[in-house]
Image (cartoon, rainbow, N blue to C red):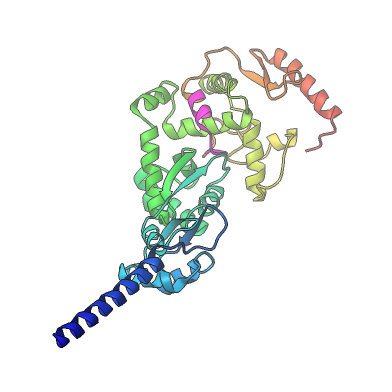
Amino acid sequence: MKLKKIITIVAVALITVLLIYGFILLNQIFSPNTKFSENEVYVYVPTDSNYKDVQKILAPYVENMDRFDLVADKRGYSDNVIPGRFLLTKDMNSFALVKTMRLNSAVKLAFNNQERIEDLAGRVGSQIEADSLSLLTSFKDSIFLKENGFNEENVLAMFIPNTYEVYWNTTAVKFRDKMIKEYRSFWTKERVAKAEKQGLTPIEATILASIVHKESVKKDERPRIAGVYLNRLRAGMPLQADPTVIYAIKKKSNDFEQIIKRVFYNDLTMSHPYNTYKNLGLPPGPIAMPDITALEAVLNPEKNDFIYFCASIERFGYHEFAATLAEHNLNAKKYSDWINSQGVKR
């Protein structure tokens, strides 16, 4: 009886110890283990990171790393680190922290209004892990371009401005491949047919849309401007688009930061592939990334008899349109006189 009593006491003591240990362990696992005041923060784990790297990344946000390490080890995370972007919320416990470090959060990546493919690479590279150089290299890959009907001058036409969900650790090549899928999805049979009706391929429609985009910020005016340029193309006239001359000046000087508000006669005589005063037809590539409204304006242009237009001094942001050169010259003189009065030199 005495031995049985001793065994019982030992068993009860052991169970008590186990219960206490279990309670302490559960408390360590499920009690809050963060030290940031914000409701939520994102952390970024680069590709090829190991567990020590993760510990350094999480150090500013985790209160007790030993408690996190305990759960990470028990749940096999320390041997299976996942790269990406991860959302931490205030007062997360260690169990929740380890769980969230396995849930890669997508980035809402947005881009628009980029003038060059280099600018786009920089814009995208600021939002995902892939840097601008690796992105630019993937965009300009000769095999990719040839397989998809692009070249280095017109590849910007492939990118449809929008907001896309991608993982932060998406590689440059995977991002590029996603963009060509989005391009094909945008250019439905209906849109291709509309472009063909205007005598354009999708790339040509995008190039023209980039000029329309630069000509006017007024979305309701863009179909009329598109109609004017299409009239010029059909008549065998040069496009004579000032935005292409501005682009040519910037491209020739390799200075895309300069601000040019005025085009002079000497600029129009410049020999350059993007000078549509000297060259017939469309320039070699887009002069900017047109938004959807500019693309739709080219696909659904206003039918009109206008051949000329210039900036309006009565409705700022809009233009005055003319069917004859004499009428246009009057409009152009009004604008020239006004801009001279404003002291705009360039």
Picture quarter with the C terminus: top right
Is residue 292 part of the magenta span, yes or no? yes
Residue 233 visible (yes or no) = yes
Q: Residue furthest bottom?
A: 3
Q: Is residue 289 above or below residue 176?
A: above
Q: Residue at horizontal 38%, vertical 71%?
A: 24
Left or right: residue 226 versus residue 68 is right
Where's residue 200, x and y in %?
Answer: 44, 27
Quadrant of the frame with the N terminus: bottom left
**Relative depth, front residue between 111 and 180:** 111
Q: Residue furthest left?
A: 1
State the image coordinates of residue 229 (x, y, percent, origin top left).
Answer: 56, 23
Q: Nearer the viewer, residue 224 or 164?
A: 164
Residue at 41%, 22% (x, y): give it.
Answer: 194
Please tell me which residue lies in front, 340 or 342: 342
> Splitting the image into 4 quarters, where does residue 270 fall?
top right
Taking 279 as reference, is 74 above or below it?
below
Residue interval drawn in magenta: 286-297
Which residue extends farthest front?
A: 1
